[in-house]
Amino acid sequence: MLGAATKKRSEPEEKRAEMADSRAPGATSTEPVTKAAGRPAKTIEARDVNLFYGDFHAVEDVTMTIEPNKVTALIGSSGCGKTTYLRSLNRMHELTPGARVEGHVALDGEDIYGSRVDPVAVRRLIGMVFQQPNPFPTMSIYDNVAAGLNLNAKKVSKTQKDGVVERSLRGAHLWDEVKDRLDKPGGSLSGGQQQRLCIARAIAVEPEVLLMDEPCSALDPVATLAIEDLIGELKGRYTIVIVTHNMQQASRASDITAFFNLDETGKPGHLVEMGPTTELFTNPKKKETEDYVSGRFG
Amino acid sequence: MPEVARAEYLEELANLEASALGGLDLVNIALGRTLEAVEHQDVELAQLVVADDDRIDGRYLEVHQALITLLATQSPVATDLRLISSLLHVLKNIERMGDQCVNICKVIPISGNEPPADREMVELILKMGRHTKTLISQAKRAFEERDVEMAQDLVRLDDVVDDLNRDCFRLALEIGDDADRREWAMTMLLAARALERTADNAVDIGEQVAFVVTGLFREFEDASHPS
């Protein structure tokens, strides 16, 4: 079943128990974030997904399978709905007033939009990293990483928390840079470090999937490379979906690429072509894709 | 957005293609002179072909460098990437074909200013040369027109050249015991071999046409696994 309840849940206790994942959440597990590379992650299957903002039809009829332990890049021009689609994969789209979702999204066969599924639990299993690094700026580096754990219902011992923080920071390739200043504010880090801190925060709660919305667009090339290396490593443990405007980044960092487009402004975005990244960048099947990846239209 | 995005880049790429394929015209000129030198035992014309190979090499270096620059600055992908990759191949083929003309021209002084020992063998070589010129022209046209069928037809023409090469070999075996005649036949065999390789290079260009169009590379003919 999907997800564990959080302390903010209002459902009756028995329902919470019913929803609780048999796997302990990261905060209470004795071995979170130490999952061996190569463990099977989960598959996302989206079928006939249509997304709306009020009357505006933003994304039309997207059907795709996102494979585990692979990096899937979503590319396409601005306004084609790729970010909107990404946000529908962990039920963040519905947080926008007036927004709604039609269709099916399943994580290893379980409908994440099921009537008894807690969206908060979904978001814990399917973490998100945003375009602008958004650590809690005044909160310490340590507390930034532990933030997800602190929201969890069960009490976590200091020792357990120390373990999770260290393993998450190591997982995000940030540990060596911050281990001597864990009490300093998150806002004191550089942009690239802040983004890795956000990744550490995301993986601290042991998600199955990591969604990344242009995670490098605010970073310089060196920090970008560090994040891309990290993405390559994280895919051994997670299913990763990344939205990027940077075509080179898609070709460097992803295994599968999905190209979204829209016929004209005001029309819904749709999935044009999806396939192995190398194929999409050397021999795309559709002319629309060819024109886009070749930079022949904007 | 402009009507055609990246117009300058596309124009540059088109110019480089024309320039690279223009190298095939240079090869055909060199090959024409080479055949004339073989026919008339013209050592001076042969030396001119050797000296003129710098033009073909120069074309190779110039277009090669420009393509590398385009790769570095424009990040080409998809068809553009395949085109650039294939042009790099084609340039190498062109450079090799130029060298084969030089190889032939270099053996002409060895064969001496004496009249050819065997007229029939010279005729065979000239015939090979004419067929090879047709292959080169057809390879160029197939590339320009992205015509895979025309490119595949190069194999048929190449088979003719291969047959003529075998005929040359048989004639050389039957040339007799005279040492001078045998030496002459040996040098003519080297020339025939160079022409046969030149025709193979034209077929290689045809394979690149198929790659540009389909995105799949496959050899039209596999010498190590003949059908």
Image (spheres, rainbow, N blue to C red):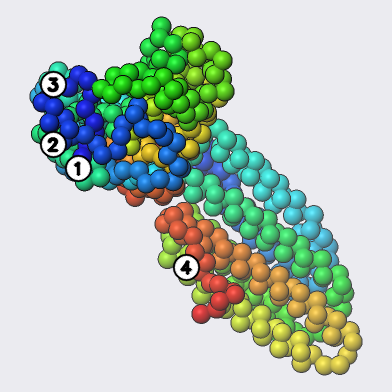
Share a chain, discs 3 and 2?
yes
Which of labels 3 and 2 is toward the front?
3
CB contact under 8 Å: marks 1 and 2: yes
| Label 4 environment density (alpha carbons within 10 Å; few <14, some 14–19, many ≥20) | some
What residue is pinned by disc 2? A114
Q: Residue at x 43, y 62 (%)?
A: B148
Per the image, the residue denoted by label 1 is A110
What is the CA distance from the residue labelled 3 to the residue labelled 2? 17 Å
Q: Does B197 sit above or below residue A250?
A: below
Give the alpha-carbon distance from disc 1 to disc 4, as whole Å. 52 Å
Residue type at mark 4?
Gln
User: How many other residues sit within 10 Å of disc 2, few (<14), some (14-19) or many (≥20)?
Assistant: few
Q: Nearer the viewer, residue A226 or B68?
A: A226
Please name the residue that numbered disc 3 is placed on.
A10
Question: Mark 2 belongs to which amino acid?
Answer: Gly
State the image quarter where residue A85 is shown: top left
Q: Quick check: B86 above or below A146?
A: below
Which one is in front, A258 or B215? A258
| N-term-proximal mark, 3 vs 2 | 3
Q: Residues within 10 Å of mark 1 (few under 14, many from 20)?
A: some
Q: Determine whether the residue tagged by mark 3 lies in a helix, strand or loop.
A: loop
Mark 2 or 4: in front is 2
Q: Which residue is mark 4?
A: B152
Residue beneath the point at 28% across and 29% down: A124
Letter of the chain that mark 3 sits on in the rendering: A
Residues beneath discs 2 and 4 located on the same chain: no
